[in-house]
């Protein structure tokens, strides 16, 4: 039985949570950015394109499947649902998402090589989705240091796994397999252990009284030293899913609009990639994906501050504290705006040498780089606003807003990419993100006025 839950401290300060989350996101984002650099340096734009296409095809499916459960769990200040409810629903949706990826690949008409890459990305994202469930629990307890440590190690190991796999085989598939192995190790050895320790005893289940008996004859056949190491390595307890169907059904319908919303957000950044792959080919997709990878640098701060502030914002809103809710919301928006401006200035001043250093001369496209960073800056502001309205538990309004945004991006891609190529793809992102900012701003103002009226 778990007896350590009460011994795990809860509630770091906002500054401590932000610091840890910033460091964790920074290292993780740097690792993923360097994966693109590795593929560009050791391979070709086609390899970068395969990797990007795998992410583009699987990301929307898994973004939908997560149902934004992490944020809903983190802002569940009244304890309406138990950890086991969130965990059970996540297990179901993750299995469904992986099946969806397999069906998509079966009917996509992709080459065998690219199909394997997409399937491998699906497995990788399944593992990450399970970890995300534990992250939601850590967020709810305001222990974002646990998330940060997991992300740091996971990012570095994933970079190492991709590099080794691709270097030895020249195959993107085996590079993604390296990511799968890395994510699995950290999920089992760190995330499950920490979640089990910080849950109440009735929320965890004992794996077995003896790891040897659990593993059966395979374990007994090992040398005793190896078996002892395996017994120490594997967690003795795991979080328990709570299979209460009425509760799961209620939670699913509550979070369904958020899942659809998040899927559409993912489509916003990936729709241009579908058009580029279909009309311009993998080579051009690789060039665009490499340049667009710089968009993920500043979200390190955006996600760190947003995730850190969400539980505090939710408490302010639940308590009717208009002044502090508005003050923290404005601070988030200001940081998002400043980060966007900084990214554009860097692209204008130092774009060509940066692209040449990280990727090579073939990737030097300064105008596209600048436009991509403009679109990213608008997205940073929209993301901060999203944290604000989510903390106010404005869930259902997000779906229609995102449908409008995604439709705008799709129409812009349909019109601009055939005429202007990669330049048109960058402009499509700017237009779509601008619509998203306007819609989310209206929702945030409505939430604040509703709070002021009491």
Image: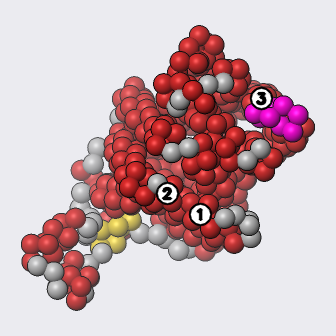
Up-down: is 137 above or below 27? below
Q: Secondary structure at mark 1?
A: helix
In the image, taking residue 100 as reference, residue 446 lies left or right, namely right
Going from N to C along the chain, the mark reached first, 2 or 3, is 2
Up-down: is 427 above or below 397? above
Type of secondary structure dominating the magenta stretch: helix
- 422 within the magenta span: yes
Question: Label for residue 171?
Answer: 2
Give the position of the N terminus as an image quadrant: bottom left
- 345 within the magenta span: no
How far from the left and from the top, in percent, is residue 306? 54, 32
The reply to whether callout 1 and callout 2 are in contact (CB within 8 Å) is: yes
How far from the left and from the top, in percent, is residue 135? 45, 49
Quadrant assignment, res 131: bottom left
Kindly identify which residue carries mark 3.
423
The front one of 180 and 37 is 37
Image: magenta residue range = 417-425
Mark 3–mark 1 Cα distance, whole angstroms, equals 29 Å
The residue carrying pointer 1 sits among few (fewer than 14), some (14 to 19) or many (20 or more) residues within 10 Å by Cα, namely few
What count of labels does the image hold?
A: 3
Residue at 64% across, 37% down? 287
Q: Secondary structure at mark 3?
A: helix
Going from N to C along the chain, the mark reached first, 3 or 1, is 1
Residue at 71% across, 20% down? 367
Residue at 17% across, 86% down? 221
Going from N to C along the chain, the mark reached first, 1 or 2, is 1
Mark 2–mark 3 Cα distance, whole angstroms, equals 30 Å
How far from the left and from the top, in percent, is residue 314? 56, 37
Give the position of the C terminus as an image quadrant: top right
Kindly identify which residue carries mark 1.
113
Mark 1–mark 2 Cα distance, whole angstroms, equals 9 Å
Up-down: is 378 above or below 123? above
């Amino acid at each position: 039985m778990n007896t350590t839950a009460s011994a795990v401290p809860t509630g770091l300060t906002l500054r401590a949570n932000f610091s840890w989350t910033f460091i964790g996101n920074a290292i993780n984002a740097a690792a993923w950015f360097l994966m693109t650099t590795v593929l560009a340096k050791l391979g070709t734009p086609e390899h970068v394109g395969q990797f990007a296409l795998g992410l583009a095809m699987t990301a929307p499916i898994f973004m939908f499947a997560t149902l934004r459960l992490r944020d809903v769990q983190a802002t569940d200040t009244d304890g309406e649902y138990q950890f086991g409810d969130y965990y059970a629903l996540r297990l179901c949706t993750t299995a469904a998402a992986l099946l969806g990826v397999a069906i998509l690949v079966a009917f996509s008409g992709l080459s065998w090589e690219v199909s394997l890459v997409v399937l491998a990305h699906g497995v990788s994202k399944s593992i990450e989705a399970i970890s995300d469930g534990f992250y939601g629990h850590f967020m709810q307890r305001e222990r974002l240091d646990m998330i940060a440590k997991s992300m740091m190690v996971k990012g570095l190991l994933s970079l190492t796994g991709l590099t080794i796999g691709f270097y030895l085989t020249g195959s993107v598939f085996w590079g993604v397999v390296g990511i799968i192995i890395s994510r699995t190790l950290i999920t089992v050895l760190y995330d499950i252990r920490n979640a089990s320790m910080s849950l109440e005893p009735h929320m965890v289940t004992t794996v077995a009284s003896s790891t040897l008996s659990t593993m059966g004859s395979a374990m007994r056949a090992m040398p005793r030293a190896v078996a002892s190491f395996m017994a120490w390595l594997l967690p003795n307890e795991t979080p328990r899913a709570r299979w209460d169907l009425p509760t799961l059904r209620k939670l699913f319908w509550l979070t369904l609009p958020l899942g659809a919303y998040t899927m559409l957000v993912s489509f916003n950044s990936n729709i241009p990639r579908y058009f580029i792959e279909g009309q311009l080919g993998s080579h051009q997709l690789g060039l665009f994906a490499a340049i667009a990878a710089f968009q993920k640098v500043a979200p390190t701060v955006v996600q760190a501050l947003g995730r850190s502030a969400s539980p505090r914002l939710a408490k302010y809103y639940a308590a009717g504290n208009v002044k502090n809710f508005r003050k923290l919301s404005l601070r988030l928006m200001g940081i998002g705006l400043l980060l966007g401006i900084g990214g554009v200035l860097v692209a204008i001043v130092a774009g060509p040498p940066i692209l040449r250093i990280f990727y090579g001369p073939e990737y030097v496209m300064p105008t596209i780089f600048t436009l991509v960073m403009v679109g990213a800056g608008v997205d940073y502001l929209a993301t901060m606003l999203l944290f604000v309205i989510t903390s106010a538990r404005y869930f259902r309004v997000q779906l229609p807003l995102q449908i409008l945004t995604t439709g705008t991006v799709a129409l812009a891609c349909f019109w601009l990419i055939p005429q202007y190529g990669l330049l048109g793809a960058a402009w499509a992102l700017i237009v779509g993100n601008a619509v998203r900012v306007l819609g989310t701003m209206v929702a945030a103002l409505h939430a604040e006025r509703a709070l002021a009226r009491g």
